[in-house]
Image: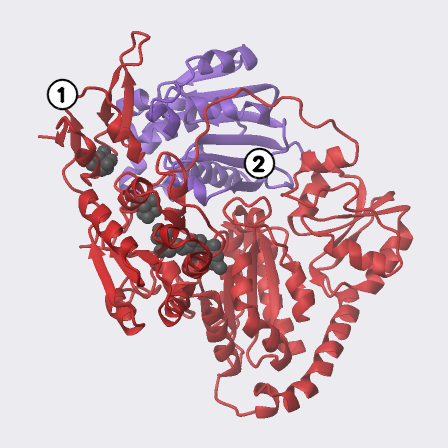
Amino acid sequence: MKKEILSGNEAIARGAYEAGCRVACAYPGTPSTEILENTVNYKEINSSWAPNEKVALEVAIGASFGGGRALCTMKHVGVNVAADPLFTLSYTGVNGGLVLVTADDPEMHSSQNEQDNRNYAKFAKVPMLEPADSQECKEFTRLAFELSEQYDTPVMLRTTTRISHSKSIVALGERANDLPEPKLIKNAAKLVMLPGNARVRHPFVEERIKKLSEAGADMAINRRELRDTSIGIITSGVCYQYVREALPDASTLKLGMVHPLPQTLIREFAAQVDKLYVVEELDPFIEEQVKAMGIAVTGKELISLCGELSPGRIRTAFGLQQPPADAGDKLPGRPPNMCPGCPHRGVFFALNQLKAYVTGDIGCYTLGFMPPLSAMDTCVCMGASIGMATGVSKVVSAEEKKKVVAVIGDSTFLHTGINGLMDMVYNNSTATVVILDNRITAMTGRQDNPASGFTLMDDPAHRIDFPLLCKSLGVRHIRVINPFDLEQTKNVLREEMERPEPSVIITDKPCVLVKREGVFHKGPVYEVAVEKCTGCRACLKIGCPAIEWRPAGDGSKKGTAFIDPLLCTGCDVCRQLCKFDAIRRAK
Amino acid sequence: MNNRITNILLVGVGGQGILLAAEILSEAVLLAGFDVKKSEIHGMSQRGGCVVSHVRYGAEVFSPTVPEGEGDILFGFELMESCRSLPLLKKGGAVVANDLRIAPPSVLMGQEAYPEWVTERIRERFPDFLLLDGQKLAGEAGNVRAANTVLLGAVSRRLDIDEQYWLQAIEKMVPKKAVEVNKKAFLLGRSVDWSKP
Ligand SMILES: Cc1ncc(C[n+]2csc(CCOP(=O)(O)OP(=O)(O)O)c2C)c(N)n1
Ligand code: SF4
Ligand code: SF4
């Protein structure tokens, strides 16, 4: 058998391929993004980026109803967006198997919260599998498709960042070729969820969960491992690995299915060990249910509700090790920064100068909140900037209203920003919206979107015309600007902020990482003429990583700026800040 | 086989090619017949933040991350980041670091200085320390960009993995036209005499 080292995400894509999956649809989001970036390598799977998670799930639902196996993937907060179809999909069930991957992010390595999406499985009454390494990612994906069809239910597969982004050895298999051909079958009683039909489906859903819980006792993925029986630990996912590392002698009940819980198996295991624990990240999801079964168990008394676990944290919780004493040396931090030549930089520089109150959104541009740009005041969830700008404007004074600007990226605007803009026009908000159109979904690693002109499968596609879209929503003042022209950027912003009507400003320079031909051009690089540089530090105020302050070295505060020619993209922004003409194109 | 796990940490700054080095290492270990796990966080780190990659191998590996204070070797691509990750190493662990300083934003903006003492601090706490000018050696091998591979060669001396597996892993993971240079760079690093103090 062929073995490869795969990440959890690569293994899920492989599992979908082997399961005969035909359609994969997603909206990118760390740590889930690479699943679709890998399904696209299998020509048998139609892979696509949807504008948001709700649409992605709806596409998958359609594919399933049509009889094909469908995969839908998203980061944990994406399920909030897709929750509406999910909860009723639980009632309709499926035709072709449907697997929804939720990639959770304990520790918030790249997320705005660390919600525990196991709760969604319970809430929506659907089964959830949780793999503990890449081999299981592949196997559980396959199994999830089978369970989905067998029990007529969508199946959720939950990973966490450490599972999605860790690599381990996977044995590859073949693609299933014995699946029925998809075709249209009408079945309103199952697929049209109006009250009359839904009332019939609800008892089915309750019965289904009961059956799954009973079947769970015999599922190989729920595995009892008896070692020293003085301690028994119920655990799942990556926590199982940490437990094996930290407490190698303890007995474990490793749950591959975390919802519904296999109650019989839990009772048996509890009876076999002297003291029972649950080790789980985030919420006491398993613990509370075990307690509700009337079984004494220890969990969150020992283990934090916050952040991700590690072998060390578990050892400390079980009193086997002191928390690490060595905190290391105090060193300058290394926060992420926008790239040299990033088109977002100039906009935030101008907003800072205009002392705007910026309702922000999520993307690379969220880094605009950091010094020295320091020009973002809020960030809640994708698409929130526009609605919040309207809301803030409703309560503050007429003078303060003029300071309110919503800033949103192209992908985020298409994700859930359009509705906010519709509301602004409809309800006469006076705020200003800036759409940062950098031609890509950059934050998550350069994915195409409906405004980039290409699909995930690399086919040319229609490019959304932002001015036209905004016009059709009723926005009367739409300005397209070059964000590398600081003067223009600042003037247009000032004018539109003053205007007591909704207006939209669209920037039109691409992300420097766009690889597609004819989009991003690296210009001639810039240099500092040392003889002219007075060391005023004005150019440092845009925080370009290509510009470095070089101290004179005589102990004084004097020094000069230096531009790293390997990093500079020639965007021209720093030149406009130098009053002494010390920055120029390198010869 | 006893289940002694070898724990390696690769640390540096986003964009330095840490992930590729970790992939070559993992691949060599796989070819040598070990179980292996590799873990790192990407995401915000892509925009010039720090990157820490964990590679663990042995007969059976559980946790994908190296338990705190159990690292055997720290493979540093940048000095300050090497220093930052020292608490992950076990007592008496080894450090191979590239003699390279990349200024973080606060230093670029002249708000603080790059700490001069990082090299001394590493040596003081981990005497089993090899400081290499990766760029210079890579230049000798034919391409300054192969600095990581030179360092990987130096690290390889301390790992019980046959040379052939390393070379096969390089062939598999590196773009075709760069294979020869990288093999040369690897062997150059591997030839550096680096014995335990
Ligand atoms: C509901 C939800 N889905 C996905 C994400 C992950 N995510 C954060 S920002 C972003 C896209 C940003 O793209 P864009 O708005 O174009 O800004 P850019 O990064 O290109 O500047 C994504 C997909 C999220 N935070 N929330
Ligand atoms: S990836 Fe693109 S959008 Fe993100 S910071 Fe870099 S240049 Fe800006
Ligand atoms: S021109 Fe100036 S601001 Fe633009 S990338 Fe080069 S150094 Fe940075």
- Give the x, y percent position of residue A47: 41, 67
| Residue A435 occupies quadrant | bottom left
Callouts 2 and 1 in the same chain: no
Chain with colour red in the figure: A
- SS state under label 1: loop
Tag 2 secondary structure: strand
Say which residue appears at 91% left-offset and 54% top-offset.
A271
User: Between A291 and B141, which is closer to the camera in this rendering?
Assistant: A291
Query: Which label number is shown at residue A532?
Result: 1
State which quarter of the image contains the N terminus of chain A: bottom right
Instruction: In the picture, one chain is purple; tell me its letter.
Output: B
**Can residue A456 be spotted in the picture?**
yes
Q: Amino acid at mark 1?
A: Lys
Q: Amino acid at mark 2?
A: Arg
**How far across and down, in percent of the image, does residue A551 sit?**
29, 15
Q: Nearer the viewer, residue B159 or A210?
A: A210
Q: Is residue A344 above or below residue A321?
A: below
User: Circle 2 sits on which residue?
Assistant: B56
What is the crowding at mark 2: few (fewer than 14 residues within 10 Å), some, or many (at least 20)? Answer: many
Residue drawn at (69%, 66%) of the image: A122
